Image (spheres, grey):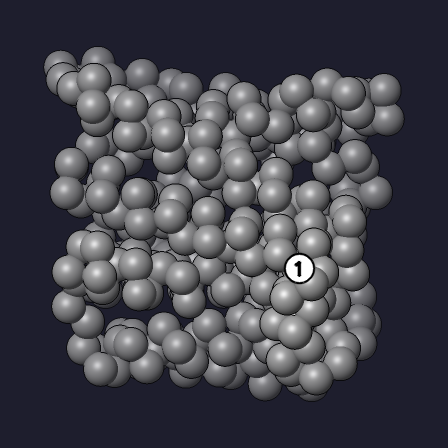
Amino acid sequence: MGTGLGFAVAAALLYGTYLYVYKRYFSHLPAMAYLAVAEGAAALWYLPVALDAWSADLAVSALDAGAVVVTALLTGVAIALSIRAIQLGDVSYVTPLNKLVPLFVLPMELLLLETVLAPLQIAGVLVATAGIYLANYEAGGLLAPFRRALSYRPAQLALVGAAVFAVVDLLKRVLLQELSLPVPLVVWVSLVGITAVVAPFGWRQRGDLPRRVLPKLLALGVVLALGDHLIALAFARLPASVASPVVNAQAVVAVLLGGLLLREAAFSRRLAASLLVVGGIALLALG
């Protein structure tokens, strides 16, 4: 448990910093074109690692290979849904709902995989998820995003995106634990799958992507590859319902950096949210 939590926390810190850098320097770029280049670069950077794992006399059944591909494509679909929700709707309502991934993972893992969690671990998942939600909450009542989800299409898309991300998290755990597939294989196919899903949309936006940013996006591919590798290591060692809230704490890291370095509003609330997340992770560790 300890090593897995370490990988999950490292992934959250790395991806949280990446999200802050994206918001500050790259958020003005067309989202799908950005993702196509950055994720494609990550797949290229990670290819030698995947080839090294494959060369170790690896035998993968057609069913296992299909499961990896489905997981990769679903990851791309979840990202596309989330971006579409943000494009169509109010960020204040969409983003908190899209970060509720752990809330979907917990019941699915308990029911489908018959995972047994200690009461402290369940409490940790709920506390950390509450912190993630609060960190991304912007305006109106705390339940306003849920009320809007009843009739507001972008909020509905955000919730569907969160549910698909939860399925992806569950499948990662199955691939890496039940099927014992190598981490590099799962990570590389996932990167390729994301690129394949977003590339057609990114191609339409290619004219709006300045060429001068391409070297920077290629460099960011290294960060994405490393972050996905750390996430996979966490899911290979932890229940998905434990790994998911810790990894998704990246959102809290990003908003804290935004509050500290960009002087964004509501910093006190986001600081309180971060304490909730830390408390949730502590409960997970104790459990």
* Rendered position, 240 above or below 69: below
**As drawn, is 236 to the left or to the right of 165?**
left
Residue 284 or 94: which is nearer the viewer? 94
> Crowdedness of circle 1 by 10 Å Cα count: few (<14), some, many (20+)?
many
For the point 31% across and 16% down, the residue is 51
User: 25 above or below 69?
Assistant: below
Residue positioned 22% across, 82% down in the render: 119
**x then y, percent, for residue 15:** 54, 51
Q: What percent of the width, then of the height, locates residue 33?
A: 72, 28
Horizontal relation, residue 240 to residue 133: left or right: left
Q: Quadrant of residue 268?
A: bottom right
Given the image, on which type of amino acid does mark 1 rest?
Answer: Ala
User: As displayed, is residue 161 above or below residue 217?
Assistant: below
Image height check: is 112 above or below 121?
Answer: above
Kindly tell me whether residue 85 is visible in this rendering.
Answer: yes
Where does the N terminus fall, quadrant-wise? bottom left
Q: Position of residue 41 (x, y in %)?
A: 57, 24
Looking at the figure, which quarter contains the C terminus? bottom left
Which residue corresponds to mark 1?
155
Image x and y of residue 198, in percent: 61, 28
